Image (tube, rainbow, N blue to C red):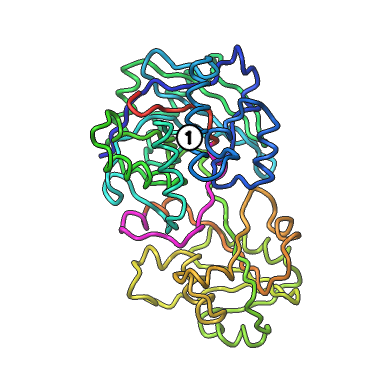
Amino acid sequence: MPNIYPFKGWRFNTNIVSDISQVIVPPYDVINDADQAVLYDRSPYNYVRIILNRSAGMERYSKAAKTFSEWKKNEILIQDKVPSVYLLCQSFFQDDQQIERTGFITKLKITKLGGDVLPHEQTISKHINDRYNLMKATKANTGQIFMSYRDQTRTVESILGAYKNEIPLIDAVLDGIQYRLWCLTDERQINTIQNVVAGTKAIIADGHHRYKTAYQYAQDHPEINGSDRVMVTLVNAYNDGMHVLPTHRIVCGKPIDDDRFIEKIKGLFDIEKKPSAAKLLNELDQRRASNTINLGVLTRVGNAYLLRYKGEDNWSSDLSTASQALDVNVLHQLILKPACGIDTRNQHDLGHLAYVRGNEPPLEMIKNVPDYDFVFFVNPPDLDQIFDVAETGETMPQKSTYFYPKVYSGLVTAGIGD
């Protein structure tokens, strides 16, 4: 069972940093060079100086540690005096509707993946050394690991409801998302939350690398008090704001004419040409709630096709029934591999794939994509599918999910041992 704990978090001192939107940042792995420059210019206390500063090599980590230490010394960051669980509400608009996602920031007992904590998609290990060096230098958890658990009683949501009338510690809007944060210190309420989480499994929604980094650090440094706990953000899968957006696939460098492509897949799919990509996407969205697997493809000559999987049973002895029911696995195994010659388990072949994800219409997002051979549109998995696959011990292909919105860094920092 997952064990969670309150902790004494470090937060920006609002007497010095009055506008928190100027200092919090996206997760490090979505910050490019241009983003980094913008964040640096935004504030001398922007959190990018800790999670992804401009220094090169090992100096990057010593510089981050020095900055973190100076900010604490100069009370740019101040520590809460009482161990707390931090209630987080993110409000945003999607399809012209305002949505609220509520969760909480806490510390979690680190265990080996596959037990209390489950991964849900495949990852590449390239970031682990980088994050390990940052953790070792700062002695802190500087980024959020976004996790989900299942609680149909919505206990945390009811607790947060009582806090919404109170002035939050943080109330900031950045990139179209409103962040509000409250500090929960009531031991009875914390114990209630602990009991709820203890009866579930926690699935990593975003932050697989950060969790693996924390696990490795805990294994390497058992002598350090608190190294076996890591800061996470937990959101109930039954929360109304828990949204999974699709991640569409772009294929480049694999030129195949339409007739040849259709010939390769027609045995497994009913194929229907649509008058436009917009009509294809509209129908794909309408079929989202159906029990069938539907995919869309836009070819380089502008033809749009709806692909309805015929539902051949047990098409892979290597995958569970839960995994075979995923749109993205059907795409990868029954289209990309045989028709496009792309094996997504081969690192070299991944160079032919790009991804389109976000809270904007797909056709807007692909406008600036250079020459492509195919764009494959998929519906996202629902949360029950994600949990079902994870609980079998399997993982989904890379970038199968996009949990929106991300949880930004800098809202709370957890010192190791705090």
Q: Secondary structure at mark 1?
A: helix
Out of 48 and 278, give the one closest to the viewer. 48
- Quadrant in which the N terminus is drawn: top left
Q: Is residue 221 magenta?
A: no
Q: Percent position (x, y) of residue 70?
A: 51, 21
Quadrant of residue 40 within the rendered picture:
top right
In the figure, 315 relative to 140: above or below? Answer: below
In the figure, 71 relative to 81: above or below? Answer: below
Q: Percent position (x, y) of residue 345?
A: 44, 70
Which residue does the image show at 61% across and 63% down from the upper left? 354
Quadrant of residue 213 within the rendered picture:
top left
Which residue does the image show at 38% across and 38% down from the upper left? 152
- Quadrant in which the C terminus is drawn: top left
Side (left or right) of 405 relative to 19: left
Side (left or right) of 145 relative to 373: left
Side (left or right) of 344 relative to 395: right
Which residue does the image show at 61% across and 24% down from the upper left? 20
Q: Percent position (x, y) of residue 219?
A: 26, 43
Which residue does the image show at 24% across and 36% down from the upper left? 222
Side (left or right) of 352 relative to 298: left
Mark 1: amino acid: Ser
Quadrant of residue 373 within the rendered picture:
bottom right
> In the rendered structure, which segment of residues is drawn in magenta?
388-407
Q: Which residue is mark 1?
A: 62
In the figure, 339 relative to 175: above or below? Answer: below
Q: Percent position (x, y) of residue 264?
A: 56, 86
Out of 116 and 154, give the one closest to the viewer. 116
Determine the main secondary structure of the stretch shown in magenta: loop
Q: Is residue 401 magenta?
A: yes
Mark 1 nearby-residue class (10 Å; few <14, some 14–19, many ≥20): some
